[in-house]
Image (cartoon, rainbow, N blue to C red):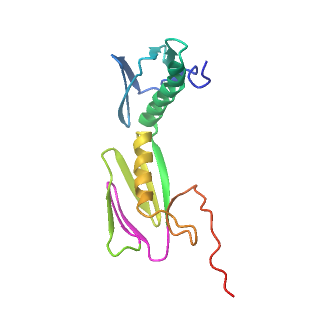
Amino acid sequence: MSRIGKLPIQIPSGVTITVDSGDVTVKGPKGELKQFITPDVDVKVEDGTITVIRKDNSKSAKSQHGLMRALINNMVVGVTSGFEKKLEVNGVGFRVGGGGQNLEMSLGFSHPVKYQAPEGINLTVNKMEITVAGHDKQQVGQVAAEIRALKKPEPYKGKGIKYADEVILRKAGKTGK
């Protein structure tokens, strides 16, 4: 039995969950999310909790059990409190501006770099820190990865865009004689 999969998910107040024909829909104050259910597991909503039950003991059912429970839990957390990732911009002459859905950055290229966030993602800029927030955990992580990919941190001086909790391993430069 999966340690994660067997745990029930508590439904907070203000959240409605519907299960129909292979889909789970979660609606809450921050938005609505929809996820398909793999045919190896069943999702039951009863008495303010959600339980994920696998249909048999096949290898695919065992692997999908914990995954479906984690995805549904992330949906419930997302529509109630949301998710966010913080990025830091380090470098001499680097600038970040904008907010909302758009970012305009000066990252050492000959042109300014513009980034348009998808619907449901909110970008806030505080000096040299970018906060990516939204209700879909996967989408927040994807947008943060796309922004980081614009100028990855380099190992000699640490210049670039990095996650706030990321540690950049530094290399030694050239040794002079």
Q: Quadrant of the C terminus?
A: bottom right
Horizontal relation, residue 87 to residue 135: left or right: right
77 in relation to 156, above or below: above
- Where residue 175 appears, x then y in whole percent? 67, 81
- Where residue 110 appears, x then y in whole percent? 34, 76
As drawn, which residue projects farthest toward the bottom? 177
- Where residue 9 appears, x then y in whole percent? 52, 23
144 in relation to 154, above or below: above
As drawn, which residue projects farthest toward the right? 177
63 in relation to 98, above or below: above
Q: Per the image, is 96 magenta?
A: yes
Q: Quadrant of the N terminus?
A: top right
For image coordinates 47% across by 30% down, the residue present is 71
> Which segment is the magenta one?
90-107
Q: Per the image, is 63 magenta?
A: no
Q: Quadrant of residue 126?
A: bottom left
Viewer-nearest residue: 73 or 27: 73
Viewer-nearest residue: 66 or 120: 66
Viewer-nearest residue: 40 or 129: 40
